[in-house]
Amino acid sequence: MSAAAAKLEVEDLFKRFGGLTAVRGVSFSIKAGEILGLIGPNGSGKSTVMKSILGVERPDGGSVRVDGIEVAGWPPHRIARVGVGMVFQHSRPLHRQTVLENIVFGLLPDRLLGFLPGAAVDARARAIAERVGLSAVLDRRPATLPFADLRKIEIAKAIARNPKVVLIDEPFAGLTARETASVAMLIAEMRNDGRAVLIVDHNVKGISALVDRIYAMHVGERIAEGTVQEVMENESVRRVYLGGALETAARPETAFRDVATPFLDIKNLSVVYDKAQALENVSLHVHQGEFVAIVGLNGAGKTTLFNAVSGLVPYAGDIRRQGQSLRGRTAAMIAREGIVQSPEGRELFGAMTVRENLDMGGHSLKERDRSERREWLFDLFPILMERQTQTAATLSGGEQQMLTIARALMMKPDLLILDEPTLGLAPLIMEQISKALERLRRATEITVLLGEQNVTFALPHADRVYVLERARIVWEGGPGRFAKEAGARYL
Amino acid sequence: MLRRALLSPPVLISLIVVLAASTLPLYVSGYVLGLLTVAYYFGVFSMAWDLLFGFANEVNFGPSFLIGLGAYTAGILDNLYQPPIVVCVAAGVLAAMTGGVVLALPALRVRGPYFGLTTLVAVLMLQNFVVVAAGLTGGEIGLTVPDVISIDDRVNYWIALGFMAVSGAILYGLSRSPVGLILQASGQDPVQAAALGFNVTKHKLAAFVVSALFSGLAGALMVFYLGAASVGTFIDVTVGVQVIVGAVLGGRRTILGGVLGAVFLVAFGETLRPLGDLATFIVSAVALAVVLFFPGGLLGMVKGAREAT
């Protein structure tokens, strides 16, 4: 077989989840010694493509060939044995075993009677550890290691069986600049070893130096393919990531009554999870009646920020509501006092009907208030009235999202926090939710803090925009200036 | 990996403890020996259960299904045809292993709480069968078997101790071997284990079969020690609970902790026996406290203390 032969060929791949077509006719191939970047925003289907190659999801149509062998529909362990290795983003190493034992594990034969590992396995594990730069920590346990070393363990396990194809999920998420460089070097080595590498990530920026080509996806389909330069200049890509020509209705900050003491004032907020810095010195404010959008990719820290405001995670720094510190108040108190979150995961009561879900939101209201409020929400989201007696679990994704927002609104919030309301939704549904938000903004006094990675959705509503990147606020300004000043960060 | 495990402190300590325990018949009463004999069989039940819970990460609420199958098959066979005891025990083991596969195959397809429920339902079904088929099984009164291994307390004690030691050595060695590692990884992160080329279902099924083998064997041997089988001693849900509490109390993922937990439960319960029903309550409360405050169990506490110094 010639060196130019494709090691991984994906052809006309389809994957449906119920009514949603997550992947629609995706085709690409990767040659030995080539790195392809598969990018797309949340819900674009890129992870589903990866899972279909890996065999974790069974494709509904199309073909996946590894070194010429058709593997579509095979169970993951068989696909792995044909020569597919996977570097997972979230590593879950064996915590009671040492680093060396973790790598040995990746080398074990899949036999029920393998009671003694050979000396050869041990020597090979040490050689791999040497290659990925783990020699110094061979006898340590994973829990005592920094993030970057954990990722190196994943890489070591993935290349242990000398795979022809390596899939890498967001290789640099959560790493510092120096760590990023060392992991990038390991990925470059895979190319030199003649492996076909697929990197899945959100945007071009993080992987541009490493990849040979980019394949960009949006709502399950290909929108662009080519070199980094070509994809970054592609009109569709720019529209998906930056929004097209915008009509904004931004109001200036001076238009709000509480200029001196903003309704919500966050100063130097920091949150640390285990080993990762989720938020670092974040300061921002929201005026009463203002619509503020926090724009940032997955993992930038949006949800952590909202959870800190809602009192769900411990933090350093100060969060004030109308001048009063929220420190020491429980999540329930904060919500009752009017800061209500519509969470990313929706967290609906699946077995309850639409109406019961709404009533759960309005449980503290008097009966009359509650029915008034409900009528108003049915007017805002007419589809929910039709679905009143259906259980939440049977709703479509878009309807569930509307119900989540409506349930939050039942609590008569002063500040509504919307975390990724468009996640995984079809464009038509986004449009409906967008219209509802527009009405909300015009017809009520409500203050909204919106977290989105879908810029197209966020900008038209926003009075002001913050860009959150790797735990920090990197830009602040009006939506009109966004594409020009912050757009490049976002591709 | 294995050689180091064989010379590790837990193995050496266990060896010393077993040797010391084998001298007990020289200076304790037959009554105490009887209690310990039962405790040792329960130790094997708990160790076999820990292989599933601690390593395959599957909560099997039906250990007594496997135990009961082994015990009753051996007992019924002896009652009907009186073949040599070895044949009865072998039949019991075979029945338990078959039951394990039958239980695991559908159960491994369902996820989360449903797996546990399936195993629980299996126990209730077996219990009902024993009661309904009273002509064969002795029903609620119980089954008396004509043969026993020995009538000598000391011999029975030594058999139980030896059996427990051998079972413990095999199960512990298995858990520390490469297949144990694969099993543990399959339990922790099945997707990743599969992505590394391991057939997760195969390994979990094998763990079920091994667990069933030791549960059934211990159950069958215990029948020929007691000379009788009843729902209350082998199948009832409370038996399963005692096995589970013993394993968790001793320490999850330690295998050997199961023996510690089982002996502790029996010894503690016996010490408090003068208190009547209150004894059960106190034992349960202590077990609950250990599980709540020391999730690592008794062995976890020992380990923690050693690492702290």
Image: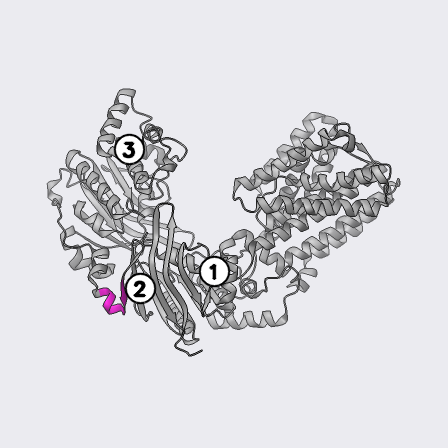
Q: Is residue B66 left or right of residue A370?
A: right
How crowded pointer 2 is (Cα within 10 Å; few <14, some 14-19, many 20+) is rated as: many
Q: B278 or A74, which is in the foreground?
A: A74
Q: Which quadrant, please, contains the N terminus of chain A? A: bottom left
The part of the chain drawn in magenta is A224-232
Under mark 3, the amino acid is Leu
Q: Earlier in the sequence, mark 1 or mark 2?
A: 1
Q: Earlier in the sequence, mark 2 or mark 3?
A: 2
Specify the label residue A215 is tagged with. Answer: 2
Instruction: Report the number of discs.
Output: 3
Mark 1 and mark 2, same subunit?
yes
Percent across and percent down for residue A365 are 29, 24
Under mark 2, the amino acid is Tyr
Chain of the residue on which disc 2 is drawn: A
Q: Is residue A298 visible?
A: yes
Percent across and percent down for residue A356 are 35, 28
Are the residues at dot 1 and dot 2 in contact (C-beta closer than 8 Å)?
no
Residue at which label 1 appears = A145
Residue at which label 3 appears = A384
Quadrant of the image occupied by residue A146 = bottom left
From mark 2 to mark 3, how far is it between C-alphas?
38 Å
Chain of the residue on which disc 1 is drawn: A
**Residue at (73% x, 51% y) in the render:** B167
Quick one: which residue is furthest to the front in this view? Answer: A61
Mark 2 and mark 3, same subunit?
yes
Quick one: which residue is furthest to the bottom in this view? Answer: A2
Badge 2 marks a residue whose secondary structure is: strand
